[in-house]
Image (cartoon, rainbow, N blue to C red):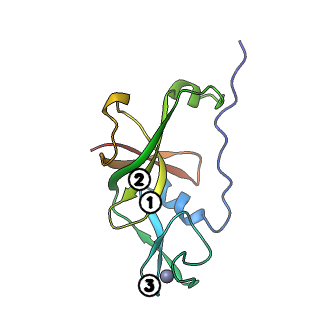
């Protein structure tokens, strides 16, 4: 029996480290622009709206609404873990008071998923220094 490789871990450059570290502690953070208040995601060196570089990591609410989603039945993600999780539901989620982010939605039947669906974050550790936010229906 061939063992599948484990899920690859994300590369964690300094730019995104606060996001992964916070998720390891069960917190969802995004960069908020000190100048215009725009919440930026994914992490960037400057504000997507006004270009200001003074972005402050800010704790977000852990709930939001599904903006869009796709359901993958693919075996292309041939890693231990993902193989067991198929089908994988990937969503764009509008975080309440925050930005739109990608995340996996779990614990939901395919036929129940819909745009606008309310979801809540939970956090899965992926190593000593990182966690990843995933979402479930509220
Ligand atoms: Zn800004």
Q: Position of residue 78 (x, y in %)?
A: 66, 28
Q: Secondary structure at mark 1?
A: strand
Disc 3 residue: CB within 8 Å of ligand 1: yes
Label 1 neighbourhood size at 10 Å, few (<14), some (14-19), many (20+)? many
- The crowding category of the residue bearing disc 3, from other C-alpha atoms within 10 Å (few below 14, some 14 to 19, many at least 20), is few
Residue beneath the point at 55% across and 65% down: 18
Name the N-terminal-most of marks 2 and 3. 3
State the image coordinates of residue 12 (x, y, percent, origin top left).
66, 58
Give the side of residue 13 with respect to residue 116, left or right.
Answer: right
Question: Seen from this angle, which residue lies furthest right?
Answer: 2
* Secondary element type, mark 3: loop
**Badge 2 vs badge 3, beta-carbon distance below 8 Å:** no
Q: CA distance from mark 2 to mark 1?
A: 5 Å
Q: Label 3, on which residue? A: 36
Residue with the mark numbered 1:
100
For residue 93, which numbered disc appears in the image?
A: 2
Quadrant the N terminus occupies: top right
**Identity of the residue furthest to the bottom in this view:** 35
Mark 1 vs mark 3, CA separation in Å? 17 Å
Vertical placement of 49 versus 124: above or below? below
User: Residue 9, labelled with which disc?
Assistant: none
* Percent coordinates x, y for residue 82 in the rendering: 57, 31
- Dot 1 or dot 3: first in sequence order is 3
Circle 2 SS class: strand
- For mark 2, does the 10 Å Cα neighbourhood hold few (<14), some (14 to 19), or many (20 or more) residues? many
Label 2–label 1 contact, CB within 8 A: yes
Q: Earlier in the sequence, mark 2 or mark 1?
A: 2
Q: Is label 1's Cβ within 8 Å of ligand 1?
A: no
Q: Is residue 81 visible?
A: no
131 versus 60 height, above or below:
above
Q: Residue at x 44, y 60 (%)?
A: 100
């Amino acid at each position: 029996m061939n063992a599948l490789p484990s899920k690859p871990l994300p590369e964690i450059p300094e730019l995104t480290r606060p996001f992964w570290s916070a998720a390891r502690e069960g917190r969802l953070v995004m960069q908020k622009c000190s100048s215009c208040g725009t919440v930026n995601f994914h992490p960037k060196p400057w504000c997507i709206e006004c270009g200001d570089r003074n972005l402050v990591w800010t704790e977000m609410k852990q709930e939001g609404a599904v903006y869009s989603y796709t359901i993958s039945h693919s075996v292309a993600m041939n890693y231990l873990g993902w193989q067991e999780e198929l089908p994988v539901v990937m969503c764009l989620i509008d975080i309440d008071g925050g930005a739109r982010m990608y995340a996996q939605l779990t614990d939901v039947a395919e036929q129940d998923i819909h745009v606008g669906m309310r979801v809540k974050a939970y956090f899965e550790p992926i190593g000593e220094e990182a966690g990843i936010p995933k979402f479930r229906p509220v």
